[in-house]
Amino acid sequence: MASSLSSECTPLKLKYDACFNSWFEGYLEPITPSGAPLSAAAVQQRNKDKAEEYDRKCGQVWKTYRECVQKAVTNKNLDQLLKEAREDNPLKDPPPPPGKNRRASRDRPRLANCTLSMLFVMYAAFKWSRRSNSMLRCIP
Amino acid sequence: MVFVFKTYNYDHPWALVNLGIWRKYPNKQCAHVISVDVLDRTIDPKTGIIRTERILGVRQKAPLWVLKLLGGSEHAFVREISFVDPAARRTTLTSVNLSLSQYVTVLEQISYTPSHTHPLARTKFTQSAEIQARLAIWKSLGTQLEKWSVQRFGDNAEKGRVGFEDVLRNLWNRREEVQVQEAHS
């Protein structure tokens, strides 16, 4: 497993990763005695049990590891960048599967951005050409 | 904006691929990834969806002159959000660069789903990336250009002023001379 961004946190990180990985093993392949798929109610119960099991087993090491990483993130001046990234893309829910035409609404601000930057370049070029003119004439 | 799109099939079941996601680094093939940290992780007790926010430290391969020009460093960081949805059997990873994000953002989306043809044995991987230069890059270049233009204009204006003053002084001196000569005659 890869190391942490701060060597100080690496031992805690390895401990936490090991805990999570062992919990995650088998999470996606629930085994039933008969081999039949779980009923909806059984799935719900299992999700709840597994979430509790994770807290019970990994909660403590997660807490200490997280404290360490958060300090390291602050020391590396990443707080602001992370804050901005979280505002730009909160990603609280899984992205929709492809083919759902989710582009359309997101393209408008980008188009505006593109138009704005082109206008800016044209404006800069215009200002520049006027300045060069007056320089040629050598008049203050 | 630039789009990149790729698909691939892994000859492994979806559940195994998911185990691999958390064990991918360190990896000789991806030596540019130096560190991986979990910043946040929640497990929804109702849906079973695991949401993980990670920060990856990478050694970036951008040309040195780009880093110098834009003020970046060799070490960059990437934020990655992943969702493992056991009911939909779909895993998605979205990652965006944190470093130099004011100039260019590279938004990568990866998904792993059981393959349509062999759902129990194979996993379909899709990857798309949007590479977008931000408005700030124009602004930054524009500001640089403006600063330079103002400087050049100032220098030239100063030369112009000095030159014009010489002309005026000469004119003035010559007039004085003429007046003196007239007075003597």
Image: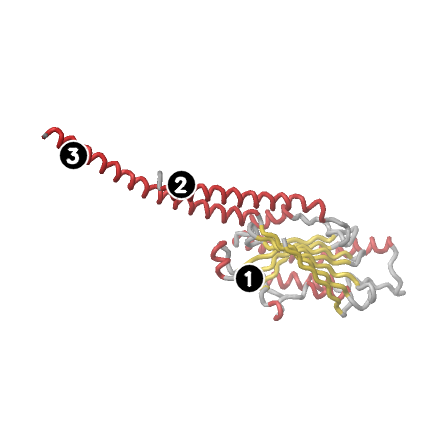
Of the numbered discs in the image, which one, if any, rests on residue B60? 1
Q: Nearer the viewer, residue A104 or B64?
A: A104
- Image spot of residue B90 (x, y percent): 77, 58
- Taking the image as drawn, is residue B117 in sight? yes
Q: Say which label, 3 or 1, has the lower sequence index.
A: 1
Q: Which of A51 and A86 is in front in this view?
A: A86
Please tell me whether residue A117 is drawn above or below residue B78 in the rendered image.
above
On the image, which quarter does residue B10 sit in? bottom right
Mark 2, residues whose alpha carbon is within 10 Å: few (<14), some, or many (≥20)?
some
Secondary structure found at label 1: loop
Q: Residue at horizontal 50%, vertical 58%? A: B67
Q: Residue at horizontal 58%, vertical 53%? A: B104
Secondary structure found at label 3: helix
- Image spot of residue A24 (x, y percent): 73, 62
On the image, which quarter does residue B35 sit in? bottom right
Q: What residue type is labelled 3?
A: Glu
Separation of disc 1 and disc 2 at Cα? 45 Å
Q: Residue at horizontal 76%, vertical 69%? A: B12
Q: Residue at horizontal 72%, vertical 49%? A: A93
- Taking the image as drawn, is residue A64 in sight? no
**Which residue is the extreme one toward the left?**
B184
Tell us which disc is closer to us: 1 or 2: 2
Q: Nearer the viewer, residue B168 or A53?
A: B168
